[in-house]
Amino acid sequence: MLGERFMISYHTAGTLAANHVFCFTMPCDAQLIEVSAVGSNANNGILTIGPTADDDSYLDDFDIGDSYTPTVADQDDFVGDEFPHPVKGTVIKASLDYDGAGGTAAANFTLVMTFLEG
């Protein structure tokens, strides 16, 4: 199955009242090739992604999309302008600051991460 794409998604319903953290263990070696994040409203949500030991080393301070229009992170948005390459067993942490620096809280947050196996 080398070279197969797979996605991991996370969703919260309703207007958020606190930060959210989503963790999962990588099932295989892979490259993170795209992140799509959105709220259903105009919001100030900020996303960071990385392994639990360095949880902003893949994607740092990324503004999520507004009003059902996702923002999409690709190679230029990742730290170091490189696709992150977590290995099997790495625990990945995606953290949402639900209102940025005290702005409007995100509602109905959806996160989709696309990986390329290998």
Image (cartoon, rainbow, N blue to C red):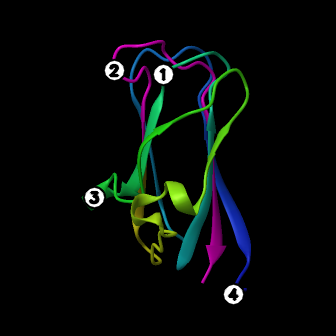
Mark 4 → mark 2, Cα distance in angstroms: 41 Å
Mark 3 → mark 4, Cα distance in angstroms: 27 Å
Which comes sooner in the sequence, label 3 or label 4?
Answer: 4
Q: Which of 117 and 56 is in front in this view?
A: 56
- Amino acid carrying label 4: it is Leu
Name above or below for residue 95 compared with residue 43: below
At numbered mark 2, what does the secondary structure look like: helix, strand or loop? loop
Which comes sooner in the sequence, label 3 or label 2?
Answer: 3
- Amino acid carrying label 1: it is Asn
Image mark for residue 54: 3
Please tell me whether mark 3 or mark 2 is closer to you in this view.
2
Please tell me whether mark 1 or mark 4 is closer to you in this view.
1
108 drawn magenta: yes
The residue at which mark 2 appears reads as: 101
Image mark for residue 44: 1
The residue at which mark 4 appears reads as: 2
Please give the range of residues in magenta.
94-118
Which comes sooner in the sequence, label 2 or label 1?
Answer: 1
Q: Can the viewer see residue 45 in this picture?
A: yes
Please tell me whether mark 4 or mark 2 is closer to you in this view.
2
Q: Nearer the viewer, residue 83 or 21?
A: 83
Which comes sooner in the sequence, label 1 or label 4?
Answer: 4
Residue 100 horizontal/vertical position (percent): 39, 24
Name above or below for residue 90 compared with residue 72: below
Quadrant where the C terminus lies?
Answer: bottom right
Which comes sooner in the sequence, label 1 or label 3?
Answer: 1
**Residues at marks 1 and 4 touching, judged by CB atoms closer than 8 Å:** no
Please tell me whether mark 1 or mark 3 is closer to you in this view.
1
**Residues at marks 2 and 1 touching, judged by CB atoms closer than 8 Å:** yes
Which residue is rendered at x = 47% and y = 77% of the image?
88
- 52 lies left or right of 28: left
